[in-house]
Image: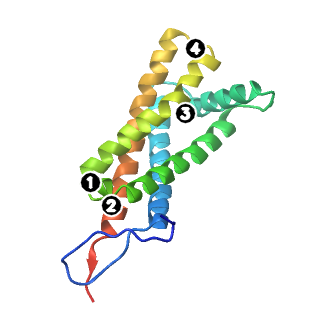
Amino acid sequence: MSMGIVLQDASLARGQITPVTFNRGMGWGLIGGSVGTLIMDLVLMEVLSAVGLPALSCFSIVGDTVARFFSIFGIEMTGGITVGVATHYIVGPIIGVIFGVAVVRAGALRAGSKKKIVAIAVLYVEILSQPILAMTPFLLKMTASDTFQWFSGSFVMHLIWGIVLGVIISHGLQSATIPHHQ
């Protein structure tokens, strides 16, 4: 199938139906990935502040992990907060776009309920994030306690991210199939 092919639900309703296209899936995925990342990060910064840790410490950990990962390949870079923020806001939207396209391409998924799409988005985010999250304890040589805390916190934050992603994509793509009366 080419990208120009339009995917559309069959409907007995009268009126014009906006087709659900590849580009629409990408767009809603980009929005869902970006908003999900932002909400996750705002909650994370609030929680870190509430427990007495620096609000941006997670970004620092992510940035240091990225720098350490690239150093394995002889690429020297400075880690820290800026690299962590950049990583979040590059990876989050990309993961959202991929999910949005997958929902459009999988007719059975697109035709599913909002709850089904949200549940699958959460599973997608949680599973896809594990290899990335697993690098941090190894590369930064975390203790067992720090590793447990890292994965526990990450699970909750990615749960939030997945819920937001699923809600936005299901809303966006389902509203695209609502008949528009002339």
On the image, the x and y values in percent for residue 5 come to 45, 70
Is residue 22 in view?
yes
Q: Earlier in the sequence, mark 2 or mark 3?
A: 3
* Callout 4 touching callout 1 (CB < 8 Å): no
| Left or right side of 155 for 10 | left
Which numbered disc, 1 or 2, marks the residue that appears first in the sequence?
Answer: 1
Q: Helix or strand or loop: what does disc 1 sit on?
A: helix
Q: Observer-nearest residue: 11 or 48? A: 11
Residue 62 % position (x, y):
61, 31
Instruction: Look at mark 1 in the image and give the residue it sits on.
Output: 114
Q: Judge from the rendering whether residue 32 lies leftward or rightward of residue 173; answer left or right.
A: right
Closer to the eye: label 4 or 3: 4
Q: Give residue 142's mark.
A: 4
Residue depicted at x 38% and y 55%: 103
Question: In which quarter of the view is residue 68 placed?
Answer: top right
Mark 4–mark 1 distance (CA, rounded to whole Å): 38 Å
Local SS, label 4: loop
Dots 1 and 2: beta carbons under 8 Å?
yes
Residue under numbered circle 3: 55
- Dot 3 crowding, Cα within 10 Å, few <14, some 14–19, many 20+: some
